[in-house]
Image (cartoon, coloured by chain):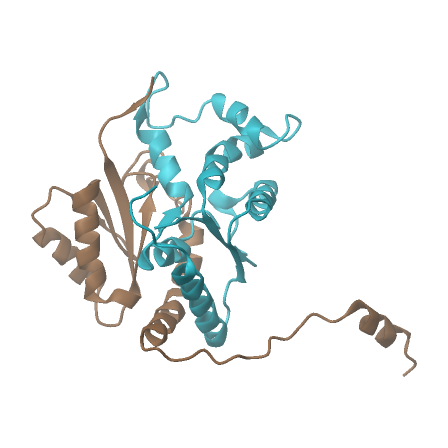
Chain colours: A brown, B cyan
Amino acid sequence: MAEAIEDNITKIVVISSDSVLPMDAAMKVYESEDAITIKETCFGTMVNGPRDAVNRVVETLRSMDRNHIFVKERGFKPGAEVRCRAGRGGGPRPGFHFLREEVSMLPMIGRALDEYDAGEPLEEKEVPQKLDVSKLKKIIDSEL
Amino acid sequence: MAKVIIYPTNSLILSDMVERFGHEPLAMMEKIREKITTVGVDSPPLNITPEGPKHGLKYAAVEVPAGVRGRMSIIGPLIDIAEAAIIVGDASISFGCMGCARTNELTKFLIREKDIPVLEIQYPHTEEEGKAFVYNIAEFLKALPTGGDDE
């Protein structure tokens, strides 16, 4: 039956910070003594290696700017043939559009996390509701 | 620590938030990693086999397209072990790897059917909505039992 080779994981570290650059994060990873592989990308870095080492490094990276650095696990290793653009003749890799869309929301999420940590209360705002069907019908039937 | 299934199942924001507030995110990426790193008769890098749609039969009927069943064979087991869920609607980005509308509907349906705490929320578009989004998720996650290692 199937059996896992080793407990290697890959994590994507997305940096949406004003004070930390992807380069700074990459340097921090290079400083690490753990046997891990990293890949610098346009949105941050990808870290691959044994689970404990990766978690340790990711925690260090996160502590650089806690609310503006986001992490998720990735199924494929950096440079995996089925995902890497180099072997697929270019074009965005699968999953890129999703990541890009979420990355555009990160500054907003980061600011909200800052406010949440600061204990600022959430102001209750009235959310515009959808128009009731009966009201819509009345509007349609009304003579102007 | 509760196992929290997220929808969209590969979301960076949700996966990060769940981990940030001390719980375990149940996400597609982890399952995919298992699929492609597990050594078997069908060797890596892609252990996507005709077995997938068969396993998916537990979650979707046989007349449902094989793609839905194949996807459910990955997402279904995650729903089975979930102890809580966060569903984010209005995800215009549910295409690409997430791109099967029927699987998405079935996933959300199965999560709602399960007797677990579910937070349903919309993707934020403005600063105010972003704030409410984070606050709601944070409060929901904080209310979940953190528990010891008694599982």
**Residue A7 falls left or right of residue B56:** left
Instruction: Left or right? Give the position of A143 relative to A95.
Output: right
Q: Quadrant of residue A93?
A: top left
Q: Is residue A26 above or below residue A128?
A: above
The residue under the point 42% across, 52% down is: B11
**Res. A109 visible in picture:** yes
Q: Position of residue B139 (x, y in %)?
A: 43, 66
Can residue A89 be seen?
no
Q: Position of residue B132 (x, y in %)?
A: 47, 71
Q: Picture coordinates of residue A59 (x, y %)?
A: 20, 56
Q: Which of the 4 image quadrants contains residue A142?
A: bottom right
Taking B128 as reference, is A68 left or right?
A: left
Q: How many marks?
A: 0
In the rendering, at what x and y percent does residue B149 appear? 29, 45
Which residue sits furthest bottom? Answer: A144
What residue appears at the point 58 percent right and 48 percent down from the top-left corner?
Answer: B112
Quadrant (top left/top right/bottom left/bottom right) for the C terminus of chain B: top left
Residue farthest front in this picture: B150
| Residue situated in front as seen by the camera: A51 or A48 | A51
Q: Residue A143 or A125: which is nearer the viewer?
A: A125
